[in-house]
Amino acid sequence: MSFAPEIEARLRADSAEIISRYPSGHARSAMLPMLHLVQSVDGYVSPDGIALIAEILGVSRAEVSAVATFYTQYKRHPNGDYLVGVCTNALCAVMGGDDIWDAVSERLGVGSDETSESGRITLERIECNAACDYAPVVMVNWEFFDNQSPQSALALVEDIEAGRPVRPTRGAEVAPTFKEVERTLAGFLDGHENEGPSAGEPSLLGLRLAAAKGWTEPVAVDSPSDQGDITEGGEQA
């Protein structure tokens, strides 16, 4: 099955815009955002999407598949409306991530990379959400839900399953659907890029302490003989 004519026309037009952002002769560099573009339509990297990207870029389907299977953000089977990622690595696990995973997995009746019966949620076990200062963290379509507990995470998935909007701790005011955020990742702004804080107090605390104490980074030097003595504030004696 191929794309409907109007959808294919839109994909080709959007792909041309993406390719135009790269230097002439380097169209293949547009493959990553084009894969996100396909997911914004199909909800995963579909065979039709692979074929279209290969044709537009003048590469083989195998080359497109090789890229799509390397990165975990590209899905090889249909994804739910919301991708819920629970971090169970290191600090998040110590702070309760494993308990959150167990509670959410039991409630939805699915394991990692599996989709709930309703089709609303695909659950994913995440190695690290890069937000250790807010552990334990849950992400919904890569929007942060910080300082979670089993109870708050269960309430979160209940809201998603019921079709209620969910509001991230940071970022967009309301978490977008998987297809919506995939179009954003393809490089097309959705109008929500300036909503919400991007960094909270825990992330900025070290910067504030450094400013209050007058700490600066060490001065760059050309050779060991030029180093001299470095003071606590990073100045050369």
Image (cartoon, grey):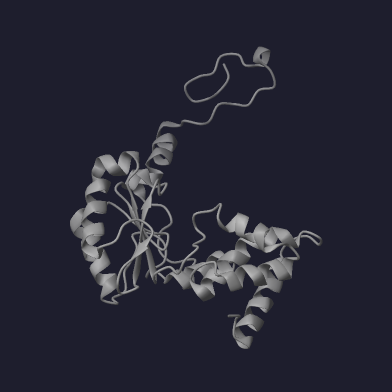
Left or right: residue 58 versus residue 86 is right
> Residue most toward the right?
25
Figure quadrant of residue 63:
bottom right
- Would residue 188 be seen by someone viewing this image from the given angle? no
**In this view of the protein, which residue sits in the foreground, 91 or 35?**
35
Give the residue drawn at x 76%, y 65%.
Answer: 58
Q: Looking at the picture, how far across and down is residue 2, in whole percent?
A: 61, 80
Q: Please say if 12 is above or below 107.
A: below
Q: Please say if 196 is above or below 202.
A: below
Q: Report the quarter where the N terminus lies.
A: bottom right
Figure quadrant of residue 109:
bottom left
> Residue most toward the left?
151
**In this view of the protein, which residue sits in the foreground, 124 or 154?**
124
Q: Please say if 52 is above or below 223.
A: below
Q: Looking at the picture, how far across and down is residue 33, in whole percent?
A: 61, 63
Q: Looking at the picture, how far across and down is residue 67, in whole percent?
A: 61, 55
